[in-house]
């Protein structure tokens, strides 16, 4: 069974940092582009970041929404079969449920095929 599981969410003060991790079972994350989406209460879901993949696991391109550029960093650890999202300088507007997703191929285009259950991130004083 293919499954994505997020971890690392929580409550943090403005200006603080969190690291979200996405672990997979049933498939190899390195074979697919992996994206992070988020949805805040009353708002539409938005793409936050995505990292592509390659056949030889050596080339990746990463993409970020304008709202998180310079503050968030996406990375892979193929040995652990995980993808992380490091979030720095967090703002109250970053509060949302964050979802790890897997696309159908190497690129971040289109819609993801698989979604995790989500991890809550709350930024408040």
Image (cartoon, rainbow, N blue to C red):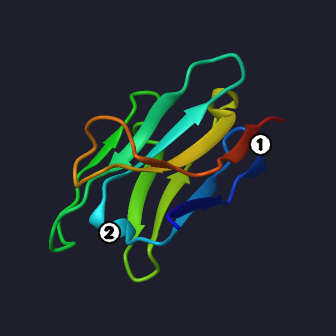
Q: Secondary structure at mark 2?
A: helix
Residue 35: % across, % down? 41, 47
Q: Could you tell whether 114 is left or right of 89 in the image?
A: left
Apparent side of residue 13 relative to residue 18 in the rendered image (left or right): right
Position of 110 relative to 88 (above/below):
above
Dot 1 corresponds to which residue?
Answer: 13
- Which residue is the extreme one toward the top? 42
Looking at the rendered structure, the secondary structure element under dot 1 is: loop
* Residue at the (59%, 57%) spot, across then down: 20
User: Residue at the spot x=41%, y=71% of the render?
Assistant: 27
Q: Position of residue 60 (x, y in %)?
A: 22, 59
Which residue is at a point 66% across and 41% down the rendered structure image?
Answer: 15
Kindly give the residue lying farthest to the bottom in the view shown.
Answer: 79
**Side (left or right) of 39 relative to 57:** right
Q: Residue at x 15, y 74 (%)?
A: 56
Q: Which residue is mark 2?
A: 30
């Amino acid at each position: 069974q293919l499954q994505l599981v997020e971890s690392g969410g929580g409550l943090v003060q403005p200006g603080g940092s969190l690291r979200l991790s996405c672990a997979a079972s049933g498939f190899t994350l390195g074979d697919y582009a992996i994206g992070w989406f988020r949805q805040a209460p009353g708002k539409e879901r938005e793409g936050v970041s995505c990292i592509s993949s390659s056949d030889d696991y050596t080339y990746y391109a990463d993409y970020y929404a304008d709202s998180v550029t310079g503050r968030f960093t996406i990375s892979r650890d193929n040995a652990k079969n995980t993808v992380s999202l490091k979030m720095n300088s967090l703002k109250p507007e970053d509060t949302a449920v964050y979802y790890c997703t897997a696309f159908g191929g190497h690129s971040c285009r289109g819609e993801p095929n698989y979604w995790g259950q989500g991890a809550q991130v709350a930024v408040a004083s």
